[in-house]
Image (cartoon, rainbow, N blue to C red):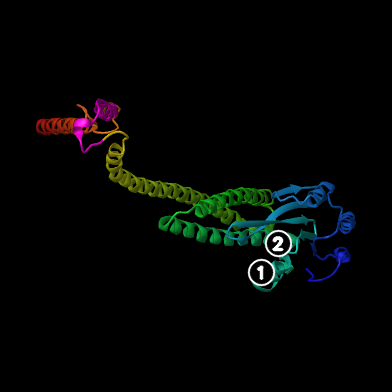
Amino acid sequence: MKTDGSLDDLENGYNVWIDLVDPDHEELLALGRKLNLDADALETYFNKSKKPEIRVLENHTFTVMLDMKNKDPKTLETEGIYLFLGKHWLLTIHTPEVKIKEVVERLFKVKNKKIKEAQIDALYYNVLAEIVTKYEQLLTALELSVNEYQRRSFVRPSPEIFDSIDILSRQTIILRRHFWRARNIINFLVHNEHDKEEVKYIEMVYDDISQLIDFVESYEGTINSIRELYVAKVSLQINDTMRVLTIFTVILLPLTLIAGIYGMNGVDLSNLELVSTGFFIVIMIMVSTAIGLLLFFIKKQWILVRPRAGSETDNLKKTAEQNNHTKNKNINASSRVWKNG
């Protein structure tokens, strides 16, 4: 494989790799006519589709993969990578944010120098493998975010944490969906091109992407647990707040009642002989109302709940006694059988 050259090298038996960065419409159509690229596949690129897929066409294979990275802890960016694989050529199309050229140069110089001597399929498989390997960085960032939000949920919950957890949950759903589609592509290549020697470069990738999916699913469960922990923590804070307010209410209510009674118009409590009968009627109505509400709460079992006969505790005791009795009978029966034997 030549590191530089042109399409004319195809006629001389060389493998050619063509890398295009945001080509314009006319440039790509002209190249498509030379390589006989499928029109529907080109239309998929023009529509900037970001759905991982693979198509086996008449004279080449069309593949869409995603380059994903975290712009910040709350933003997941995805860029499409479009690969056309022919008999002796490979065409990659992507945006400037995707560094495919650096990936291929690292493969040639460091990871696998024998790719230059292999068929063009080897380069295609290795590029797919490098894309999947880069996904591991996403899980590292995801794991750090999960641990951070879990720690902050224990310290002091806030609405910002809940919003961040919700964003993180949506990111895990997106990652899992894209990982599933990428695994389908790898699985298709492994099973349908097993007769090619170069497919060995991608066989290990299937296990890697499957492991990534398992990690994402486990993180998704952890995120749900953090959300439940957050809700429980907030509920405890509300309970503490209500308890403090209730204490203040209980302290101030008798004082308010006394102040209300002494503030009644036309009542001089310093001279009870002059207190009208209506005052005592009002007091009796207040006392009756309090007693009536107290009896109502007791009937509803909101306060002063008494354990019923045959309660759960009694039932547990009876069950334990029955189990012990049955156990003793089984031991005695076993003893008799042993003696008879």
- Residue 190 is one of the magenta-drawn residues: no
Question: In the drawing, what numbered circle is on residue 122?
Answer: 2
Name the kind of residue labelled 1 in the image. Answer: Asn
Q: Decide: few, some or many residues near mark 2? Use Cα within 10 Å; few <14, some 14-19, many ≥20.
A: many
Q: In terms of secondary structure, where does tag 2 sit? A: helix
Along the viewing direction, whichever of 8 and 300 lies nearer the viewer: 300
SS of the residue at dot 1? loop
Asked whether the viewer can see residue 44, the reply is: yes
Left or right: residue 35 compared with residue 274: right
Q: In the picture shown, does residue 336 fall above or below 13?
A: above
Q: Is residue 97 above or below residue 316?
A: below
Q: Quadrant of the N terminus?
A: bottom right
Picture coordinates of residue 92 (x, y %)? 77, 60
Where residue 45 appears, x then y in whole percent? 79, 52
Q: Which mark is residue 39?
A: none
| Label 2–label 1 contact, CB within 8 A | yes
Q: Residue at x 75, y 64 (%)?
A: 96
Q: Which residues are drawn in magenta?
A: 268-296
Residue 146 % position (x, y): 49, 57
Q: In terms of image quadrants, where is residue 157? A: bottom left
Question: Is residue 314 visible to the viewer in this orientation of the structure?
Answer: no
Quarter of the rendering containing residue 259: top left
Residue 112 numbered tag: 1
